[in-house]
Amino acid sequence: MPEVSTIGLVAALDIGGTKTTAALVTASGEVVSRRTAPTPGRSGAAAVLDTAAGLVEKLRADAPDVVRALGVGSAGVIDSGSGRVLSATDVLTGWTGTDLRGDLARRLGVPVTVINDVHAHALGEARHGVAAGHDTVLYVAVGTGVGASFVLGETVLAGAHSAAGHAGHQPSPYAGTLPCTCGGRGHLEAIAAGPALTAEYIRRTGRPVADLRAVAALAAGGDETARDVVRLGGAAVGSAVGGLVNVLDPAAVVIGGGVTGLGEPWWRALRDAVPAETLPALAGVPVLASTLGPDAPLLGAASLAWKVS
């Protein structure tokens, strides 16, 4: 077990559509303990909050020191000022409008900060991960969707409507007129997210595959169509990242999410596409792989909790 700080601990929550994880974290970013449970997303907001608060209570009961505050990274568009969920997908039934900060503060009796989960992940990597030491960091997550966050000093750019970071919903030349999950067409998410790459393989071959893992296995086994789809996904993300680098001029870019597990062909296509889009002055911006994995959103949420502890 890591050495515990003499000034106490904070709790952190990562509330996702399928699972919720709680952890106790030191001021230096060490995870002392953690608990995970399935998120009862179809059972309504109260059930999700019961699960989240219950995990923290169990950790606190065994805590080696006082728990001073709670930081939450949650799925959905979050108003970081009020701690309310402004909008969310149907994966979390009734999540929109939930007063996360107020409800959890009442249940647990500690100060609470709330932020979107992708923003929490970005903060974790910027403070304690591969981008530590950089003051401005662009984080891009590629999984079932495509999200992003821009870390600026000690905080993230939330935007005027708390909706900054929807990188998957920018136009992509690789997507053509493919329908996007948001209702639009031709967006990055429609060609680069995990389900989109699976659908692209099926379109090209007419052969059903279960999921992206199956496409990855086919690519590793020499299936040329699968290999081309993997490279397509990497190139689409890289092209979009290059454009974002031109807009934001970050000191470093971090790429995370489940799709990055497609391996070196995906990464090579991404890294080749980034400099093809960036201005010459920005060609040297490093593009790094996320290193913290599932700890990143916990550490990012914890870093905000320390500010209110």
Image (spheres, rainbow, N blue to C red):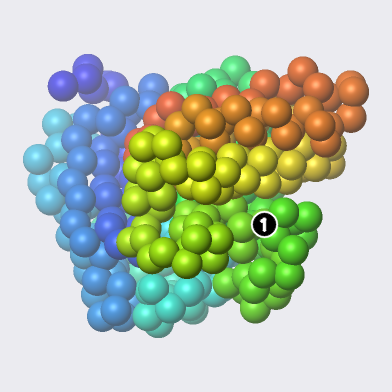
> Where residue 166 sits in the image (x, y, percent)?
65, 58
Q: Quadrant of residue 62?
A: top left
123, 18: nearer the viewer: 18
For the C terminus, give its image quadrant.
top left
- Seen in the picture, residue 72 relative to 182 is either above or below; the reply is above
Of all residues shown, which one is farthest toward the left? 62
Q: Quadrant of residue 132?
A: top right
At x 51%, y 22%, the residue is 130
> Where residue 183 sits in the image (x, y, percent)?
65, 78
The secondary structure type at the circle numbered 1 is: loop
Q: How many marks?
A: 1
At x 54%, y 74%, the residue is 87
At x 66%, y 41%, the residue is 235
Q: Amino acid at mark 1?
A: Leu
Of all residues shown, which one is farthest toward the right? 280
| Residue pointed to by mark 1 | 188
Dot 1: few (<14), some (14–19), or many (≥20) neighbours within 10 Å? many
Left or right side of 152 for 52: left
For the N terminus, give its image quadrant.
top left
- Seen in the picture, residue 116 relative to 150 is either above or below; the reply is below
At x 28%, y 58%, the residue is 19
Left or right side of 42 for 196: right
Q: Quadrant of residue 279?
A: top right
257, 266: nearer the viewer: 266
200, 25: nearer the viewer: 200
Residue 41 visible in the shown view: yes
> Where residue 70 sits in the image (x, y, percent)?
36, 48
> Where residue 93 sits in the image (x, y, percent)?
37, 80
Residue 306 visible in the shown view: no
- Seen in the picture, residue 286 relative to 39 is either above or below; the reply is above
Left or right side of 9 for 245: right
